[in-house]
Image (spheres, rainbow, N blue to C red):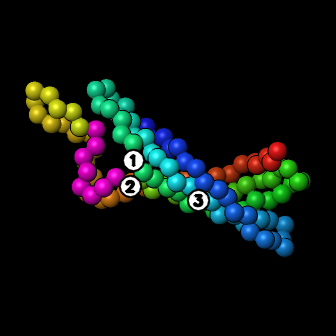
Amino acid sequence: MTTEYLHFGGTLLFDHETWYEPYLSLTVGATRLSPKSGGYDSETKFSGSIGGGFRFPINERLAAVAGGRAYVTFIGSDTDLFCLSDVNGLNCLFRSSGSTYLQFEAQLGLSLRF
């Protein structure tokens, strides 16, 4: 399954008196879930994310960044996704017994302000 996010949000940099800057990031938007096997349509669901970490400024425009982010997609309780009805009946690729789909990521890189 391919998962694509289209989110809008922002990042809050906290006041600091040290050589690093903690931050918090929040976004909301949509998640597009697409099956890799043929014949099934993609589905789009409401989602959001929360992230945080630290920026380590190198100069006024460049900083090293380390952080993490959690994405939550709301899929509804006991949901069947990517269902296809044919002569053999209803076939579904994904069955959910919960109401959310969670993903996590870790980030390490550079940030450039312009």
Classify residue 32 by image quadrant.
top left
| Residue nearest the viewer, comparing 31 with 59 | 31
Q: Residue furthest bottom?
A: 17
Q: Mark 2 belongs to which amino acid? A: Phe
- How far apart are the two marked residues, 2 and 1, measured between alpha carbons? 6 Å
- Magenta stretch: residue 19 in it? no
| Structural crowding at the residue carrying mark 3, measured as other residues with C-alpha within 10 Å and reported as few (<14), some (14–19) or many (≥20) | some
Considering only order in the chain, which callout, 1 or 3, is on the residue closer to the N terminus? Answer: 3
Quarter containing the C terminus: top right
Residue 26 picture location, percent across and down? 59, 59
Residue 27 in the figure: left or right of residue 82? right
Q: Residue at x 15, y 36 (%)?
A: 90
- The tag on residue 107 is none
- The tag on residue 74 is 2
Dot 3: element: strand
Q: Residue at x 67, y 58 (%)?
A: 11
| Structural crowding at the residue carrying mark 2, measured as other residues with C-alpha within 10 Å and reported as few (<14), some (14–19) or many (≥20) | some
The residue indicated by pointer 3 is 26
Residue 22 picture location, percent across and down? 72, 66
Q: Which residues are drawn in magenta?
A: 74-82
- How far apart are the two marked residues, 3 and 2, measured between alpha carbons? 16 Å
The residue indicated by pointer 1 is 45
Mark 2 vs 1: CB contact within 8 A: yes
Q: Residue at x 65, y 64 (%)?
A: 24
Q: Mark 1 belongs to which amino acid? A: Lys
Residue 7 in the figure: left or right of residue 109? left
Q: Is residue 84 above or below residue 74?
A: above
| Structural crowding at the residue carrying mark 1, measured as other residues with C-alpha within 10 Å and reported as few (<14), some (14–19) or many (≥20) | some
Q: Do we see residue 36 in this rendering?
A: yes
Classify residue 43 by image quadrant.
top left
Q: Residue at x 76, y 48 (%)?
A: 110
